[in-house]
Image (cartoon, rainbow, N blue to C red):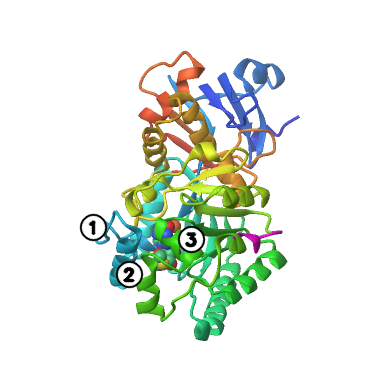
Amino acid sequence: MINAKDCTFLYADWLLTCDEKKFFIKDGAVIFNKNIVDVGTLAELKKKYPEYEYKYCGKNSILMPGLVNSHIHLEFSANKTQLKYGNFMDWLNSVVQKREDLIEKATEKVIDEELNKMLQSGTTTIGAISSHNFDMTSCIKTPINVVYFNEAIGSKADMVDTLFTDFKAKLKNANEHKKDNFIPAIAIHSPYSVHPFLIREVLQIAKEKHLAVSAHFQESKGENEWLNYSKGEFTLFFKNFLNQNKSLTKPLDFLNQFKDIKNLSFTHCVEANKDELETIKNLDASIIHCPNSNRLLSNTILNLEHLENTNLALGTDGLSSNNSLNLFDEIRNAFFMHTEIHPNILAKKLLLSATKGGAKALGLNKGILKKDKDADIISFTLPDTCENEDDLLTAIILHTTKVNQTYIQGKQIEPS
Ligand code: MCF
Ligand code: FE
């Protein structure tokens, strides 16, 4: 028996479970309160629960899990035209130059508007990397689920105690607002920018408090050369700004410090070699793919064929390296970039990475329409009928930028 009073009953022309088993349900229906109660064809569910009224999502409608944007930087939301693209070091130098101005312009109102646009485009969960907690008020009040990654950054030895104290204050601040849809977590900025002492201490906290952890990793050729040989285009930056002439860690030594972190992700990984990818896989970590950002900052692309058996998630990164935080835009761009994979196979891979894959990366019970999962659900319609499930996912990617209905943990959300 179900308590119909607390439940919503929806059906659509197609339901995508985003679970590899039984991915497509034609004329699919879902019953949910805060969690999903049942999923099946409308005929099956009507037979099981005949006395209830089911609401139709419309002609050519789709029901699927809400999207998970696993990696964004909201504090950079004010950037439109200020940063340099094409080479990571040029971008980084422009960030150093414009950072204060951009951060000042990223007011609560600007960030709220971006979050609202994300809601309208079907994103129900984000992994937000926060450098300063300036985005925290917006992240606490949004109905979107937020895994809030407090960032540890800084490689100067004489600053390390201060940096650690600041980090702990930020984490404490975030922890005071912890709730169902605001979950504090830890970001280690990258192997090149965080002192080994800081990495060790911060990971110790993550282990003790069972927090999710994320890090940028192997994003550019410059990073790879610096980490392995203390050479290349990072050299000047480290000499000038940090008076440092040697990398403090090697890529594999960096990765090996993350053992025993349960919900772990590495963003970018475009320059990661076979051993590094193998280590990531053995850590049971996820790789977060940010294709637009990689195109803009380093003009590279992740090789998806090298990632067998590693969980893949998807992110937009911030507006510091993108023109949109709409995850359907990102999926569409990725779809056109990865020309080595058949469109329909790639479409499935990308939609999985934006739902189930993202939920795993962030350690959440979401991303799949299945009994007992959190009821984060979106519905939208296609411009015409699609009879064949083989073509459906490509059609969705080509034609979707906005959704009609959004439910987060069972509650219907009206974008403001
Ligand atoms: O992911 C992109 C590129 N890689 C590294 N960092 C950032 C990205 N977008 C914003 N950032 C932030 C980062 O969180 O840039 C700051 C850090 O606080 C400066 S260091 C690159
Ligand atoms: Fe990033």
Q: Which residue is denoted by mark 3 in the rendering?
A: 129
- Estimate the spatial distance between the alpha carbons at disc 2 and disc 3, rounded to whole Å: 16 Å
Amino acid of disc 1: Thr
Q: Is mark 2 within 8 Å of ligand 1?
A: yes
Residue in view at x 38 percent, y 32 percent: 400
- Could you say which quadrant of the image residue 109 lies in? bottom left
What amino acid is found at the position of numbered circle 2 in the picture? Arg
Image-quarter location of ligand 2: bottom left
Task: For label 1, count other residues whose C-alpha is less than 10 Å away and answer few (under 14), some (14-19) or many (20+).
Answer: few
Is 10 drawn above or below residue 208 in the view shown?
above
Q: Mark 2 highlights which residue?
A: 99
Horizontal side of residue 96 vs 286, given as left or right? left
Gap in angstroms between the C-alphas marked 1 and 3: 21 Å
Q: How packed is label 2: few (under 14 Cα within 10 Å), some, or many (20 or more)?
A: some
Residue 275 forms part of the magenta stretch: no
Using residue 80 as the reference point, say whether residue 309 is left or right of it: right
Q: Residue at x 34, y 68 (%)?
A: 103
Residue range highlighted in magenta:
255-260
